[in-house]
Image (cartoon, rainbow, N blue to C red):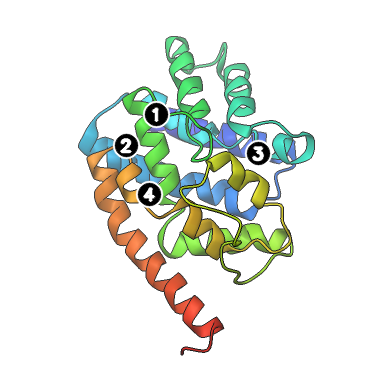
Amino acid sequence: MRELRNWLLKLAAETMAREGSEDAAHDYDHLLRAMALADTIQAHEGGDQPTIWAAVALHDIGQTRERHHGGDHAQIGAAMAAELLTNTLFPQESIPAVQQAIRDHRMTGGTIPQFLEGHILYDADKLDSLGAVGIARLYCITGHYNQKVYTPVPSDITQPVDPLLVRQLRRRPDYSPSIEFDLLFGDLPNRMMTLTGRELALERYGYMKEFFTRLRKEVEGEL
């Protein structure tokens, strides 16, 4: 079984290299972290390991095409995953479940994962968006677009916000990780799909909240 896991990670690395991936927040290291988290969750929650491994390994392979050509990398990646896995050593009957998990993994996607394997991908991916790693990844993204270290949520934005609106805000020059945290992360631990995911998310979320609270105080001269 471990040979399959390693083969899937190698397939993902080769695909990302071929696609020209240059996104430090969604790179191969992100896949390795998400895979380790998925293994932890699966050990407590169950689920089909090959499906989980393939979904985690391939969930972001559509990122580069979205960045250059538009569209939704979850939908793009699901189609690419089927092409990559067909007629390989991967269990062919599991390919549709892999595709569904990938389609449903986005926090701003407007869909909810339908099966346990999709729940585990969602939770593993979101856990890597929290805590110290999550902070670092947010600054990788905003740094790429030369955006701000800190800005408050724009006054014309009311919460709760439509996640699709966040996608538009992410391209504004005054966007910042603090806006992303305020708009998308507030109830994230409660939105995790598994009990194990919720338990892991609570500690990471607490650390992240403390960081952005301190950042605001420093920027506003309170500290």
Name the secondary structure under disc 2. loop
Name the secondary structure under disc 1. helix
The amino acid type, in three-letter code, at marker 2 is Met
Q: Nearer the viewer, mark 2 or mark 3?
A: 2
Q: Pointer 1: what residue? A: 118
Give whichever of discs 2 and 3 has the lower sequence position.
Answer: 3
View extreme (right): residue:
69
208 up-or-down from 40: above or below: below
Question: Where residue 196 sits in the image (x, y, percent)?
Answer: 24, 44
Task: Tell me whether circle 1 and circle 2 mark residues in contact (CB < 8 Å).
Answer: yes
The amino acid type, in three-letter code, at marker 3 is Gln
Q: Nearer the viewer, mark 4 or mark 1?
A: 4
Give whichever of discs 4 and 1 has the lower sequence position.
Answer: 1
Q: Which of marks 4 and 3 is in front?
A: 4
The amino acid type, in three-letter code, at marker 4 is Leu
Q: In which quarter of the image is the N terminus?
A: top left
Give whichever of discs 4 and 2 has the lower sequence position.
Answer: 4
Q: Pointer 4: what residue? A: 188
Mark 1 neighbour density, 10 Å: few (under 14) some (14–19) many (20 or more): many
207 up-or-down from 144: above or below: below
The residue under the point 32% across, 24% down is 48
Alpha carbons under labels 1 and 3: distance apart: 18 Å
Question: Where residue 151 sits in the image (x, y, percent)?
Answer: 60, 69
Alpha carbons under labels 1 and 2: distance apart: 9 Å
Q: Pointer 2: what residue? A: 193
Residue 63, label in figure: 3
Task: Tell me whether circle 2 and circle 3 mark residues in contact (CB < 8 Å).
Answer: no
Alpha carbons under labels 4 and 1: distance apart: 16 Å
Mark 3 neighbour density, 10 Å: few (under 14) some (14–19) many (20 or more): many
Residue 158, label in figure: none
Give whichever of discs 4 and 3 has the lower sequence position.
Answer: 3
